[in-house]
Amino acid sequence: MYGGGNTFEGIKTDSIATEDPTKLAEFEARIERGEKIEPADWMPQLYRKQLIRMIEQHAHSEIIGALPEGTWITRAPGFKRKMSLMAKVQDEVGHGQLLYSAAETLGKPREQMIEDLINGKSKYSNIVNYPTFTWADCCFISWLVDAGAIVNQLANAKGSYGPYCRALDRICAEESFHLKYGHHCVIYLASGTPKQRQMFQEALNRWWPPMMHFFGPSDKISAHTEVLMRWKVKMGTNDEMRNQFLDMYVPKIWELGFTIPDPKLKRVKRQVSGNTLNLIGKNLSA
Amino acid sequence: MDHTPLKELLYKMADDQLILGHRNSEWTGMGPLLEEDIAFSSMAQDKVGQSLALYTLLHELGESDPDTVAFTRNANQFHNCQLVELPNQEYDFSLIRHFLFDTAEALRFEMLTRSSHQPLAQLATKIRGELRYHTLHANTWIKQLGSATPESISRLQKSLEYALPFALGIFETSLYEKELIAAGIFEGEQALQQKWLAKIESILSQTSLQLPDLKLIQPIVGGRQGKHTEHLQPLLDEMSEVFKIDPTAEW
């Protein structure tokens, strides 16, 4: 589980000026041609630093993210849910393990990353700090937070750093099962007793604001963002990721008869790649 | 044919696997190393899956469905040994319990592959394969940490001494011991305990840990008859918390 918030703040791009211009040009040409950068290859310091930071935050988010859901393993209703949730949360810890390995290829030892997590130096997705009050909160995470993470991770899997992309390919394959599991849980709540429906509606009300924050603040395109996008470290703006999530999942939530606590959200016509599509958004003028 | 002895055997095994699986799953997200977190989660899945398979055999013998049996009984209706219900405590205790219990379970299911009750023999063949990894995991860590530092050795030694009376309770004599042996369903708790002792002695002899004289230890029994520590009922209350919001609902 990983969102876009906080990842790219506050690193100065000045260091690029001190890089060897020939090597930098060759590096950029390789990325332009769609090649992957591998651990032993030359790379600018800023690229290395940003990737470590991003992959490490991603890994931490998986590990901390195991906690709010993990607390429901011992309470999951029935064998089917209990066994599925155990496997699902175990997957998340496994993703953390895989991502720490990917980050280690850039030179930071796992021990150091874990220490930075424990002493508060490293950040991670804020959404995993929210408590899960009911079983329905856990179902919300399994379905929708994982769905948001998949949107981000599918985009990042097309990035330029080989080990991260390969880790993400594996992670996305597993996450697609989580999504099916989470959706299945929510369908049962939606088609269950009034109490079950109410539980999910309340969870949705609680989780919607953090879910929107999950993708990060609205983007202001800076020189810094521009260089990271050129190097295929950042693969899309926060708003693009958020809109993609809304387009895909708001109709599914409505289909189940739930209300999203954002009255401005409605079906709109939006231009995507020259085509007018019926999408979700707040663009009332369309 | 009277299935009471067979059912009693299946219930105690299923309850053992469910309760220890539940305890193992409490390590998910909390393990001392990522690899150990993942290992305990895997064993938890295996054990809960094994309990489901055993409850399914019971269902075929006329008992209620597995969800009802697992999620609606009270502590005094559970037949697990007390060892498995004890809280996880520190990692050293969890590891020692895992070693003592899984060594016994691996041998139990090995014996049951020869059971005259065919569905059980078939299931035991499958479970035996899974448990091989559990004992491999336990033995690896016991050998490693049982010979590592003064702290790791003294912690494991202390946990071993604490856990042994409970571990002997795994082999509490069944009311139907004779019938089970005579019918060729199971070779009996006593035979199992002997094999278990030989096995744990052989592993511990490769470490700096000392196995106390078992003749001087009073086994803690009662679990098989529904007598439990104060830890089981809260575990069951937690396990059934959501299920009991509405037992007729589908979750």
Image: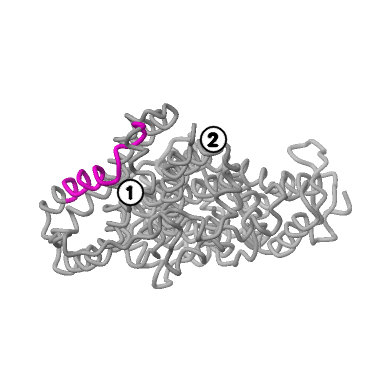
Q: Are marks 2 and 1 in contact (CB under 8 Å)?
A: no
Disc 1 marks which residue? A105
Q: Residue furthest right?
A: A285
Q: Which mark is residue B235?
A: none
Left or right side of B28 for B220: left
The x and y percentages for residue A111 are: 31, 61
Residue at left 59%, top 67%? A131
Q: Nearer the viewer, residue B152 or B236?
A: B236
Q: Main secondary structure of the magenta part?
A: helix
Q: Residue furthest bottom?
A: A119
Relative placement, left or right, of A179 versus A202 is left
- Asked whether, in this view, residue A128 is left or right of residue A57, the answer is right
| Residue kind at label 1, given as amino acid type | Thr
Tell me the SS state at disc 2.
loop
Residue under the image location 40 percent in, 54 percent down = B224
The percent position of residue A264, horizontal first and vertical second, equals 84, 59
- The subunit carrying tag 2 is B
Mark on residue B61? 2
Q: Nearer the viewer, mark 2 or mark 1?
A: 2
Determine whether the residue tagged by mark 1 lies in a helix, strand or loop: loop
